[in-house]
Image (tube, rainbow, N blue to C red):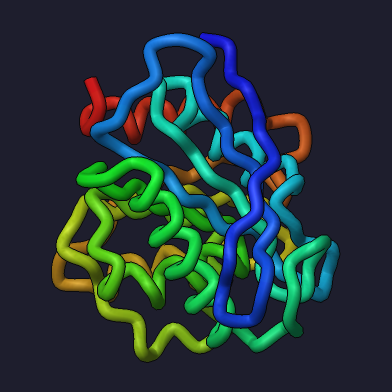
Amino acid sequence: MRVLSQAVNFNGPAGNIQGVLDTAETNLRSDYISVNCHPHSLHGGSMTNKVIHTVSRSFAGFGIPSLRFNFRGVGQSEGEYDEGVGEQSDLQAAVNWMQTQYPDAQLLLSGFSFGSFVSALAAHQLAPAFLLSVAPPVMRFDFSTFQQPDCDWQVIMGTADELVDYASVETWVNSFATPPGLTPMNDASHFFHGRLVELREIVENLVKPHVI
């Protein structure tokens, strides 16, 4: 299914938020929305990052309107980096905007690296129907306040991730009374170099039970 990308802007707590809305050219659905969070703002992370671009368009391929956006201080989004705290408010604003565009739609939420930290901490309040965490940086950020949401939660990790230790993520995942699903990608690096087609297929397979 062909996916179209449209530039959007909306108000956030620190000012303008810049985004891109990925939508299917045909068979656009109104029962689900997807909001997707990019990697670290101070290390080149943005909504054009190839991993979150792949994830967002994977959702859109099912006909689901899918938003990726720049956190405060990135691109044309106003404000300054806030260590994941203000970024949770940015995410809330993004979800609110999408819910205004598509009322009564169920939320599918994803994040990559730093974005998975932001989306995980905000998930309990946002109450998504599905949470996808790609390479959650559990040893780099404080996940101690994370409350596991009452939804299907899936984690994707490269076993050769050079920035986030795979074994640490596996231990963290297994520490929950009801662990999330963990999909390892053997020998994949943090940015899934050369593995984006495989990543897209994994995302599609994880999302499919919810939307088909």
Q: Is residue 63 left or right of residue 197?
A: left
Residue 170 image-quadrant placement: bottom left
Q: Quadrant of the C terminus?
A: top left
For residue 134, above or below residue 200: below
Q: Is residue 5 visible?
A: yes
User: Residue 142's spot in the image, x, y percent?
Assistant: 50, 88
Q: Is residue 165 visible?
A: no
In this image, 93 relative to 41: left or right? left
Q: Nearer the viewer, residue 128 or 11?
A: 11
Measuring from the top left, give residue 163's x and y in whole percent: 71, 66
Q: Quadrant of residue 101?
A: top left
Q: Position of residue 207 (x, y in %)?
A: 33, 33
Horizontal side, residue 174 vs residue 70: left or right? left
Q: Residue at x 75, y 57 (%)?
A: 46
Instruction: Determine whether, in the image, residue 82 is placed left or right of residue 148.
Output: right
The vertical placement of 137 against 201, above or below, is below
| Number of callouts | 0
Closer to the camera in the image, 74 or 197: 74
Q: At 33% across and 24% down in the image, what residue appears?
A: 29
Image coords of residue 27 (percent x, y): 38, 12
What residue lies at 66% left-to-right and 33% top-to-bottom?
6
At x 54%, y 87%, the residue is 85
Residue 165 vertical placement versus 95 (above, below): below
